[in-house]
Image (cartoon, rainbow, N blue to C red):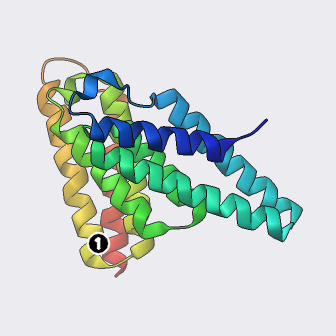
């Protein structure tokens, strides 16, 4: 049975108990895979309700997604910032069409990745950073102002420089080519304005 509302409520209660207990190690945080499962199931229910055109199911599934978003916000405010939280939150917001919230989450994910020591030397983190930067690029392209495009170019340049510096004696990861093509794309777009 798909009881996502009950799962959300349980996770919320765990966070409330953890906040009340001064020793947070006694009460575990909801695990990433559980949160991802709740998010995925809740969004699937919403999508199914949209397809069925059942107004009652749509209203119920929409409220569930809002609860998911509240849970993610609570997790972000009560735990150490982790990139997966912002990634999942951005996904939820994107699925619901909340564009500004998507951009906020992407920027928080970007900053969290940037603050991790040595991310530019870790292939998986460089790949994750590239995915985030591509999504940020997409947002800035949709805004389409010269200022927005320039800000994005600066952001991508900073990422490329860090990766170049970290791999000065070794082969550059393929993601650098992808990022440099984004910069070229931004230059072209700025010339058209």
Quadrant in which the N terminus is drawn: top right
Q: How many marks?
A: 1
Residue 118: % across, % down: 16, 26
Residue 30: % across, % down: 44, 31
Report the residue that reaches farthest toward the bottom: 193
State whether residue 106 is above or below residue 128.
below
User: Image point 31% across, 73% down: which residue?
Assistant: 190
Seen in the image, is 33 located left or right of residue 18? right
Question: In terms of image quadrants, where is residue 87?
Answer: top left
Question: In terms of image quadrants, where is residue 148?
Answer: bottom left
Seen in the image, is 165 located left or right of residue 35? left
Residue 94: % across, % down: 53, 59
State whether residue 86 is above or below residue 166.
below
Asked if residue 132 shows in the view, the reply is no
State whether residue 109 is above or below residue 49.
above
Residue 47: % across, % down: 74, 55
Question: In terms of image quadrants, where is residue 31?
Answer: top left
Dot 1 lies on which element? helix
Asked if residue 126 shows in the view, the reply is yes
Quadrant in which the C terminus is drawn: bottom left
Report the residue that reaches farthest toward the top: 170
Q: Nearer the viewer, residue 17 or 32?
A: 17
User: Image point 41% across, 69% down: which residue?
Assistant: 100
Q: Which residue is mark 1?
A: 148
Q: Nearer the viewer, residue 146 or 25?
A: 25
User: Image point 22% across, 27% down: which residue?
Assistant: 23
Q: Nearer the viewer, residue 184 or 2?
A: 2
């Amino acid at each position: 049975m798909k009881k996502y509302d009950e799962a959300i409520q349980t996770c919320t209660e765990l966070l409330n108990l953890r906040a009340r207990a001064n020793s947070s190690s006694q009460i575990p945080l909801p695990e990433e895979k559980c949160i991802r499962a709740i998010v995925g199931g809740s969004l699937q229910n919403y999508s199914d309700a949209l397809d069925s055109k059942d107004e009652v199911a749509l209203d119920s599934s929409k409220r569930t997604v809002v609860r998911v978003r509240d849970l993610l916000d609570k997790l972000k405010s009560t735990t150490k910032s982790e990139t997966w939280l912002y990634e999942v939150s951005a996904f939820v917001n994107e699925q619901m069409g909340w564009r500004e919230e998507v951009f906020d989450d992407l920027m928080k994910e970007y900053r969290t990745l940037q603050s991790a020591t040595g991310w530019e030397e870790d292939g998986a983190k460089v790949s994750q950073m590239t995915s985030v930067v591509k999504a940020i690029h997409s947002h800035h392209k949709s805004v389409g102002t010269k200022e927005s495009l320039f800000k994005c170019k600066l952001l991508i340049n900073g990422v490329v420089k860090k990766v170049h510096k970290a791999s000065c004696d070794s082969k550059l990861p393929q993601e650098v080519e992808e990022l440099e093509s984004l910069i070229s794309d931004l230059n072209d777009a700025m010339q058209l304005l």
